[in-house]
Image (cartoon, rainbow, N blue to C red):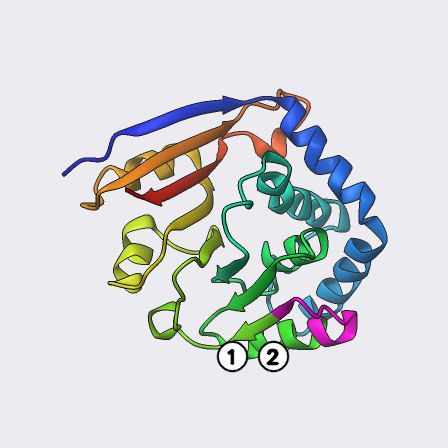
Amino acid sequence: MKQSVKEVNIGLNVLEDAVALYNKHAERLEEYTDLLLGWNDKINLVSRNVSRETLKEHIIHSLIPAGMGLLKSHDRWIDTGSGGGLPGIPLAICEGQKKWILNDNVRKKMRVAQDIIDTMSLENCSVAAKSISLFDLAKGDGIVTKHAFKVDDLIRLLGKKPWQTILMWKGAEEALKEVKSVGKNMNVTLYRFEFGKMNPFYEGKALLLLKKK
């Protein structure tokens, strides 16, 4: 059964809201940047030669759904395929009233994530070093994932778990191709980033929102 997809173009104001959220929490987000870059010299968490400015863009990119109000529906979110903590740690910093669990089956990455959490005293954030297929999802949990899974692979790994919302950072065309082959009864919204030529980092990128009917 092919999925129908609602497509929504989102404009520069959404990026401006994410930048404002970054600026509000800049001191803590810069601390996270320092720790992530320090660890990245030892363990490949993000691209080896990533610049500080590019990493800042990745963090702002992670904050976009918070500015859009897409995180309001759940009090606990699981960031699966988290690696070095993107998007989960920036969201935990900026959405401190919510609980965040960083999930990845690569244990050395989760040890780094735990060290960053401990160093930053992020009391609303924890780790789960296992496959998402083995994670005990509670009814009411939301899932976020940034460029870590194909849509059908994540749905398959979740099986019959009681998820309600999945929010995925993906390329727009990639997302459309993947979601139309998933045989699940879901409400699907694709938020395309239309931030203009002055923001090439976001060109072709989107957020994919999946909700169970």
Q: Which mark is residue 16?
A: none
Marks 1 and 2: CB-CB under 8 Å?
yes
| Residue in front for this viewpoint, 98 or 125 | 98
User: How far across and down, in percent of the image, does residue 179 sit?
Assistant: 29, 40
Task: Tell me which amino acid carries mark 1.
Answer: Arg
Mark 1 lies on residue: 107
Task: Report the residue at 51% width, 52% height from top.
Answer: 74
Left or right: residue 32 compared with residue 177: right
Residue 6, picture quadrant: top left
Residue sitting farthest toward the right: 27
Q: Which mark is residue 111?
A: 2
Q: Spatial distance from mark 1 to mark 2, Cα to Cα?
A: 6 Å
For the magenta stretch, what is the residue range?
117-125
Left or right: residue 167 compared with residue 125: left
| Residue in front for this viewpoint, 120 or 72 | 72
Q: Is residue 66 visible?
A: yes
Magenta stretch contains residue 124:
yes
Task: Report the residue at 70% width, 45% height from top.
Answer: 54
Q: Is residue 49 visible?
A: no
Task: Tell me which amino acid carries mark 2.
Answer: Arg
The quarter of the picture where the C terminus appears is top left
Q: Secondary structure at mark 2?
A: helix
Q: Is residue 107 above or below residue 210?
A: below
Say few, some or many: other residues with alpha carbon within 10 Å of mark 1 (under 14 / 14 to 19 / 20 or more).
some
User: How far across and down, in percent of the image, does residue 174 sit?
Assistant: 37, 38
